[in-house]
Image (spheres, rainbow, N blue to C red):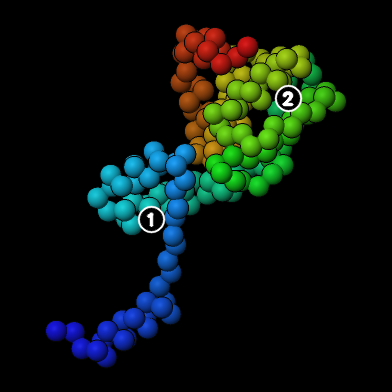
């Protein structure tokens, strides 16, 4: 049996030294909650995700400014203009004097950004360049789930048919 003194000492240690975080999931995030519930060691799983994220530079420390040179319109500028909230961010894009704000978008909405850029008349060196820029905005700037090098590697590995299929599916 554990003595009362030991219980008090353990409780004092927990209060003074240990840190605790509570995570709440909205009904929209039920898939996240269900995935976590499937993990046999939830604490270990979360800590490993954090360690992996720290090794990548931290997803909340995503890039907030990005520029690329188009084939015909000069520099295209993309900036994160708002705080990360509800898994979304605000972006502002400038092309040859034209300016557009995108409110509360996530990586899945990055194709909307690229479509607007294309409608502004921006030409890319090719579909691979377009794919890279769309995925850089989505995965590096918005979601923070990839590095620039990972996107470069994935772009290099894409087949011409895969690129054509992506363009047909996502670009107006």
The percent coordinates of residue 18 (x first, y second) are 40, 73
Q: State whether residue 141 appears in this view.
A: no
Q: Position of residue 140 (x, y in %)?
A: 57, 37
Residue in front for this viewpoint, 45 or 153: 45
Q: Position of residue 38 (x, y in %)?
A: 28, 44
Q: Can I make out residue 46 in this image?
A: yes
Dot in front, 2 or 1: 1
Where, by quadrant of the figure, is residue 89 drawn?
top right
Q: Is residue 141 left or right of residue 156?
A: right
99 up-or-down from 125: above or below? below
- Residue 78 place in picture, x, y as percent: 71, 33
Is residue 11 shown left or right of residue 77? left
Nearer to the camera, 72 or 14? 14
Which residue is depicted at the point 61% across and 34% down?
Answer: 105
Of residues 52 and 23, the one drawn nearer to the viewer in this rendering:
23
Residue with the most extreme right position: 97
Residue 90, above or below 72: below
The earlier-in-sequence mark between 2 and 1 is 1
Q: Which residue is mark 2?
A: 69
Residue ranking furthest to the bottom: 5
Disc 1: CA contacts within 10 A as few (<14), some (14-19) or many (>=20): few
The secondary structure type at the circle numbered 1 is helix
Taking the spot 31% from the left edge, 47% from the top edge, the residue there is 37
- Residue that numbered label 1 is attached to: 47
């Amino acid at each position: 049996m554990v003595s009362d003194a030991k219980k008090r000492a353990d409780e004092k240690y927990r209060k003074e030294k240990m840190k605790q975080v509570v995570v709440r999931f909205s009904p929209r995030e039920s898939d996240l909650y269900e995935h976590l519930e499937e993990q046999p060691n939830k604490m270990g799983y979360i800590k490993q995700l954090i360690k992996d994220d720290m090794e990548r530079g931290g997803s909340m420390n995503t890039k907030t400014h990005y520029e690329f040179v188009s084939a015909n319109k000069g520099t295209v500028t993309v900036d994160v203009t708002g705080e990360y909230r509800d898994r979304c961010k605000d972006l502002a894009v400038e092309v040859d004097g034209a300016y557009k704000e995108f409110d509360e978008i996530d990586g899945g909405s990055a194709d909307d950004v690229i479509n607007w850029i294309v409608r502004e008349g921006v030409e890319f060196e090719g579909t691979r360049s377009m794919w890279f820029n769309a995925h850089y905005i989505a995965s590096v700037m918005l979601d923070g789930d990839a590095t620039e090098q990972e996107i470069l590697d994935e772009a290099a590995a894409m087949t011409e048919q895969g690129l054509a299929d992506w363009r047909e599916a996502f670009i107006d």
